[in-house]
Amino acid sequence: MKKILFVANVAKEHILKFHIPTIKHFKEEGWQVDVACAGDEEVPYCDHQFHTSWKRSPFTFKTFRGIRELKKILASEHYDIVYCHTPVGGLVARMAAKKARKNGTKVIYFAHGLHFFKGASPVNWLTFYPIEKYLAHKTDVFFALNNEDYDFVTKDFCKSLTVRQVPGVGADFSRLDVEDKAAVRAAYRRELGIPEDAPVLIYVAELIKNKNQPMLIDALRVVREKHPQAVLLLVGPEHDNGAVKAYVEKQGLQDAVKLLGWRSDIGKLMAASDIYVASSLREGFPINLLEAQYCGLPVVATKNRGHVTPIVHGENGFLVDIGDHEAMALYIDTLLTDPAVYEKLSSVDVSRYECHRIAKELYDTVLETTGCKGREE
């Protein structure tokens, strides 16, 4: 039986969110699939789950403890492939796998968006660029999600590295399905205290600096000049020490911005909404945009290397410059006042990115790039 170890920073906000279809596909193909990550949440379909010490940030002593933990796991299990994700998971796995690689283990690093990119701060470049360039020598295969990352790694990292561009991790659209959307929409609006005819914007993302939620709050303030009942739903766990909440209060929009925290009922919240907005500074590949489009919501998003991969301005969504809340408000108003535009951008086909299709594509790419043989061979 072939053996693969998935490594990432946390279970809840990464493994469970992105990788279950791929884990399941490997299991169905006859592999032993293990997972190493922080967090107590149970990961389905895997054979063994290792609860590790590292944190979301790599700059703690627990990173070194995690490397020691993973070295012991690799020494005892003898994996064919170590498939690592996130900056912490990628750092820990590649540092720990030195001896395992000498014994034939292949290491894949799936970059969900490099922290150094066009427009990134000098601090990001000085911090993450040398780390990633060094770790590239401890990597066999590099998966990139967007053109910018692929081009950069291909041209600037070590020549022995095999690089592939992949179309994301896929989206489990079925979890967003809602029966009787009209009834759900009405019920959720009552629960949230939103009038039936109020325009509702929604953004599903953790509250961190990169997601740039203050831009959406600024855009909402402009939108409410013409649509005074407009509401913004911010859905995601808080990791910003209350910064977004404080900004909402500073703008006097406590009644118009609803901070909902982490939710498992995203499909129903989408059904209660009208437009999906996204303000992030950087993305690897924007699954959240595809999920919104599956739910029939038009998208207005910032121009970053991730968003511009699936979104073509004016064809299947609107794109605005990062920080340009006036332009975002303008396109939101266009969607609210032009039924033909709304109909066009709320009818986007995203079946290409369905998780089962992508899981098979990733599986085939893993086998092709590592030289591992599948069950059928």
Image (cartoon, rainbow, N blue to C red):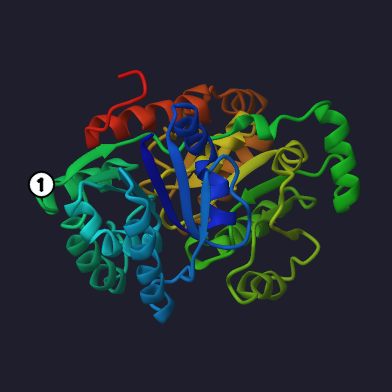
75 and 327: which is toward the camera: 75
The residue drawn where x is 89% and y is 40% is 187
Note whether residue 21 is visible.
yes
363 and 377: which is toward the camera: 377
Rendered-image quadrant of the N terminus: top left
The residue drawn where x is 25% and y is 47% is 105
Q: Extreme bottom residue here?
A: 61
Q: Residues within 10 Å of mark 1 (few under 14, many from 20)?
A: few
Q: Where is residue 16 in the image (x, y as percent from the top left)?
A: 57, 48
The residue drawn where x is 33% and y is 25% is 374
Q: Quadrant of residue 213?
A: bottom right
Q: Using residue 360 as the reference point, say whether residue 222 is left or right of it.
A: right
Q: Position of residue 141 (x, y in %)?
A: 23, 44
Q: Using residue 208 as the reference point, say whether residue 114 is left or right of it.
A: left
The residue drawn where x is 67% and y is 51% is 223
- Residue type highlighted by circle 1: Ser
Residue placed under numbered mark 1 in the picture:
160
Q: Extreme left residue here?
A: 159
Rendered-image quadrant of the C terminus: top left
Q: Using residue 235 as the reference point, say whether residue 79 is left or right of it.
A: left
Q: Extreme front residue here?
A: 76
Note whether residue 115 is visible.
no
240 and 215: which is toward the camera: 240
Q: Where is residue 13 in the image (x, y as percent from the top left)?
A: 56, 55
* Marker count (numbered): 1
Q: Where is residue 183 in the image (x, y as percent from the top left)?
A: 88, 31
132 to 177, vertically: above or below? below
Which type of secondary structure does the marked residue at label 1 adopt? loop
228 and 85: which is toward the camera: 85
